[in-house]
């Protein structure tokens, strides 16, 4: 009897063990900008919810939209669209309306960001603002003793083959700013006429001899500076942050023409099979302590003003959290571009030109 009981107990233990081995760890798949899935903050989420976070990185907003429209929406659970495509993603039914009761920290996010209509459709909210920042001019301080005053420095013949721009419509916006098309209404940058787009194309074709490379990932631009292949570029604070960490002599500035900026949102794809876990991830990522950790990696400004309590006075000043209103006057946040296909056509013609 005892022997039989021992056999049954060992059999039961084996079944339990097999069952636990057969349990699959849930995986949350992300398609996000670089820096948004760093182990320094993602690991704690994985441990808390006994899951794995797997991230793919996108090089542009258009790449994200192309993947979602191309049938890949079901491959990802969470995406981080910027303010130029977040609206169209929600309108196209590619994202899920959020259950904000599962994201309690949403109420602590900046009202300046949550009140915008970007991700609100018919009373439903499709995304949480996460990080925001500028597209600054980044430069090598051994070449420029003081910050360049204007984007026009990119066209200076003495920097032939030493400039880099982003392979993105932001470069179209920058050229439009130089041509004054943002006056008096900055939103005109996102509603350029055919005539204005032709002038932008000509301006960018004039720039091509100075372009060493059009970068498509943050790491690519960081390497271009490290290898002394470029001396100035339009970039993100992320690259300036990366270069500072390796003691590269880097500067970052917003020229007199001002610059465009972005608000990145976290959204859950309509095809996600991990909707509850995805809501938990959004909540985790907008909590004040996580926001501070993301800022440490990226150099971006957090959507949660509460993150400032974990920062030094210098960090608060560096992220412009001490004077948000005035700083944002220098940034023309990306908006939905109704004629995005036409903008891309112009940009592709610039890239293809020899």
Image (cartoon, rainbow, N blue to C red):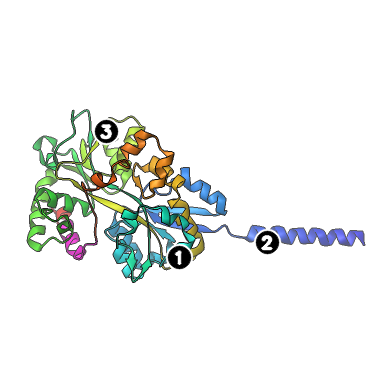
Residue hosting label 3:
250
Indicate whether residue 345 is drawn in magenta: yes
| 351 versus 121 height, above or below | above
Which sits in the foreground, 310 or 90? 310
Q: Earlier in the sequence, mark 2 or mark 1?
A: 2
Q: How far is disc 3 from disc 1 in space, using C-alphas?
A: 42 Å
Query: Residue 99 bears which disc, if any?
Result: 1
Magenta span includes 193? no
- Marked residue nearer the N-terminal end (2 or 3): 2
Numbered disc 1: secondary structure: loop
How many numbered circles are shown? 3
Question: What element does badge 2 sit on?
Answer: helix
Marks 2/1: CA–CA distance? 33 Å
Name the quadrant of the N terminus.
bottom right
Front-most of residues 95 and 318: 318
Residue where numbered disc 2 is placed = 19
Instruction: Please provide percent x and percent y for residue 291.
Output: 42, 46
Q: Residues within 10 Å of mark 3 (few under 14, many from 20)?
A: many
Q: Residue 351: x and y, percent?
A: 17, 53
28 over 91 or under it: above or below: above
Q: Residue 142 location, x and y as percent? A: 22, 28
- Bounds of the magenta segment: 336-347
Q: CA distance from mark 2 to mark 3?
A: 54 Å
Q: Residues within 10 Å of mark 1 (few under 14, many from 20)?
A: some
- Judge whether residue 95 can be spotted in this image: yes
- Secondary structure under tag 3 reads strand
- Crowdedness of circle 2 by 10 Å Cα count: few (<14), some, many (20+)? few
């Amino acid at each position: 009897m005892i022997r039989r009981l021992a056999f049954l107990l060992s059999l039961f233990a084996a079944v339990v063990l097999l069952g636990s081995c057969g349990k699959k760890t849930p995986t949350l798949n992300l398609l996000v900008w670089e820096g948004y899935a760093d182990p320094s903050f993602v690991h704690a989420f994985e441990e808390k919810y006994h899951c794995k976070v797997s991230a793919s990185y996108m090089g542009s907003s258009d790449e994200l939209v192309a993947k979602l429209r191309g049938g890949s929406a079901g491959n990802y659970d969470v995406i981080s669209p910027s303010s130029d495509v977040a609206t169209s993603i929600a309108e196209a039914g590619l994202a899920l309306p959020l259950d904000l009761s599962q994201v309690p920290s949403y109420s602590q996010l900046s009202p300046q960001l949550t009140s915008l209509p970007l991700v609100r459709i018919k009373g439903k909210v499709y995304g949480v603002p996460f990080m925001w920042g500028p597209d600054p001019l980044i430069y090598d301080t051994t070449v420029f003793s003081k910050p360049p005053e204007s984007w026009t420095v990119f066209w200076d013949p003495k920097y032939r083959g030493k400039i880099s721009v982003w392979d993105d419509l932001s470069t179209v916006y920058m050229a439009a700013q130089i041509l004054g098309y943002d006056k008096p209404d900055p939103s005109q940058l996102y509603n350029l006429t055919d005539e204005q787009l032709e002038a932008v194309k000509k301006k960018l074709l004039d720039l091509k001899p100075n372009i060493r490379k059009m970068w498509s990932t943050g790491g690519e631009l960081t390497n271009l500076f490290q290898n002394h292949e470029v001396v100035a570029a339009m970039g993100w604070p992320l690259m300036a942050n990366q270069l500072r960490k390796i003691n590269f002599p880097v500067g970052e500035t917003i020229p007199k023409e001002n610059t465009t900026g972005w608000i990145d949102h976290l959204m859950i794809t309509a095809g996600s099979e991990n909707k509850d876990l995805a809501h938990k991830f959004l909540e985790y990522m907008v909590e004040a302590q996580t926001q501070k950790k993301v800022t440490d990696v990226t150099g971006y400004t957090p959507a949660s003003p509460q993150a400032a309590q974990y920062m030094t006075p210098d960090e608060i000043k560096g992220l412009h959290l001490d004077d948000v209103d005035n700083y944002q006057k220098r940034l023309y946040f990306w908006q939905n571009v109704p004629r995005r296909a036409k903008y891309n056509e112009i940009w592709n013609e610039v890239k293809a030109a020899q």
